[in-house]
Image: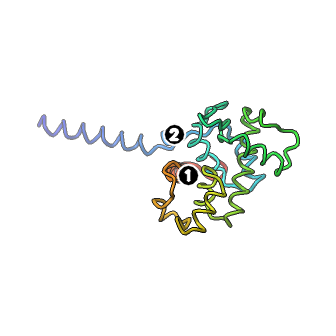
Amino acid sequence: MRRKKVIWVLLAVLMVVFMVINSPMVWKWMYPVKYHQEILQAAERYTVDPRLIVAIIRTESNFEEGRVSRKGALGLMQLMPDTADWVIKQGGFKELTVADLEKPEANIQVGAWYLSYLLTKFEGELVPAIAAYNAGPSKVNNWMSQKMWNGSPDSLENIPYGETRHYVQRVLYYQQRYNQVYNERLE
């Protein structure tokens, strides 16, 4: 009799745990979105999926504003100063300077423009655009033209740089998670 009671209690606990784990609130806690409005505005302006922007930010800085990498990449979207300077000029961000990248709104705007540029450059192909965000478009073009990597998600292991390979895998993982948890309005 006592054994049956223990089994029922365990089943009840497992059901509660299962319900909690599958709660949208828990998933949103595990995969938060900060700078919601800034991301949505940039995504709409530059026609980029906001969940991709969120996945890049999560991978690059984990939403830590003002972050500077060992290599000198700046802000939420970890833009290299030379790249950011080029984007500021090409994207017509006349009011911005590289120093403004410490501000989340400016960083997200510049990063989203650059993502949009890369997606256009790689004809809408997501994986090469993500790789180029990390390694640079010239490197990715070189890998693809020399048949080192074909740009497909099925051949990530052929990306010559381990850091870029891991980066692409992480961004795709986070994008998939954010796609499961949030709609296109990040709700």
* Residue in the picture at 47% in, 65% down: 154
Specify the label residue 25 is tagged with.
2
Describe residue 129's horizontal placement relative to residue 154 as left or right. right
* Residue in the picture at 51% in, 58% down: 159
Residue in the foreground of this view, choosing between 78 and 16: 78
Q: Residue farthest to the right?
A: 94
Residue occupied by mark 1: 175
* Residue in the picture at 37% in, 44% down: 18
Q: Position of residue 35 (x, y in %)?
A: 68, 37
Q: Residue farthest to the left?
A: 1
Residue 153 drawn above or below residue 111 = below
Position of the N terminus by quadrant: top left
Measure how far apart labels 2 and 1 are at the Cα level.
18 Å
Residue 112 drawn above or below residue 121 = above
Describe residue 144's horizontal placement relative to residue 92 as left or right. left
Structure colour scheme? rainbow
